Image (spheres, rainbow, N blue to C red):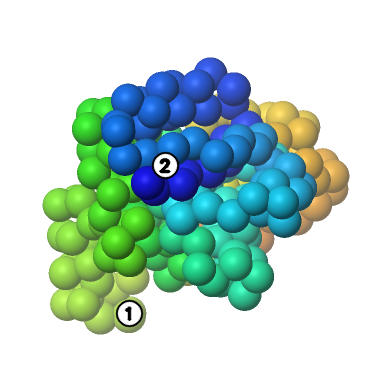
């Protein structure tokens, strides 16, 4: 029996994932958390084989959690399930320690297959991710897109601003102060060579970030 733990701050999403996985006879849901503090407490009391993890958590991001798990719970195999397309976060997630990356808009059977694959210690790679990996091997560092050089927090800030969210909303979502978010915004504008949110949004759309 594959023991699975869920970490997603949206209760409805967790319920959907739980219902999907619970239908599989070889998968058991052993715990649910809405953020990293809850997850840490659960892991202290109850281990698991696979952690189904959202990349967009309040406070500490899923990417930060992945890096921490590599040190504190190396036996757990994280599977990222995100609303963001593979092009935006998949490679970052794998580098941070994920064993797989699945889009929330995919078919339910894909999630079940992904859990079974990573439970065996293998990486779950979709055709889109495979193509990204191949392109990454054949691309010169100088040809790297500017936003690919952003930090994880800076990329989150870019996506949220380009999606129309205000700085106050972003601060609340990431459990950061508005001043800190403003600093991230300034770094993004500087690194991308842009002047304002309008230019940032145009850049994000043209480069497939949103």
Is residue 185 visible in the rendered image? The answer is no
Q: Quadrant of residue 168?
A: top right
Name the one closer to the observer, 179 or 91: 91
**Which residue does the numbered mark 2 point to in the structure image?**
81
* Residue plotted at (64% across, 50% down): 46
Q: Residues within 10 Å of mark 1 (few under 14, many from 20)?
A: few
Locate residue 177, reporting x and y percent. 84, 44
Q: Position of residue 125 (x, y in %)?
A: 23, 57
Q: Which mark is residue 142?
A: 1
The residue nearer to you, when weighing 137 against 206, is 137
Residue found 66% across the figure and 35% down from its top: 34
Marks 1,2: beta carbons within 8 A: no
Q: Residue furthest top?
A: 12
Residue at mark 1 to residue at mark 2: CA–CA distance = 31 Å
Judge from the rendering whether residue 132 lies leftward or rightward of residue 20; answer left or right: left
- Residue 101, given in percent of the width and then of the height, sits at 35, 50
67 left or right of 206 in image? right
């Amino acid at each position: 029996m594959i023991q699975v733990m869920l970490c997603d701050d949206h209760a409805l999403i967790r319920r959907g994932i739980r219902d999907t996985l619970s239908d599989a006879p070889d998968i058991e849901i052993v715990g649910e958390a809405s953020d990293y503090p809850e997850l840490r407490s659960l892991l202290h009391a109850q281990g698991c084989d696979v952690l189904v993890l959202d990349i967009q958590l309040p406070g500490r991001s899923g990417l930060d959690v992945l890096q921490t798990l590599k040190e504190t719970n190396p036996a757990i195999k994280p599977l990222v399930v995100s609303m963001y397309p593979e092009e935006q976060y998949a490679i970052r997630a794998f580098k941070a320690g994920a064993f797989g990356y699945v889009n929330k808009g995919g078919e339910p059977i894909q999630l079940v297959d992904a859990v079974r694959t990573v439970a065996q210690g293998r990486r779950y790679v979709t055709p889109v991710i495979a193509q990204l990996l191949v392109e990454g091997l054949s691309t010169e560092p100088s040809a790297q897109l500017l936003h690919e050089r952003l930090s994880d927090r800076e990329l989150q800030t870019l996506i949220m601003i380009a999606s129309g969210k205000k700085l106050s909303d972003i601060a609340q979502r990431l459990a950061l102060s508005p001043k800190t978010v403003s600093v991230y915004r300034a770094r993004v504008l500087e690194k991308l060579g842009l002047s304002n949110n309008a230019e940032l949004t145009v850049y994000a759309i043209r480069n497939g970030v949103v």
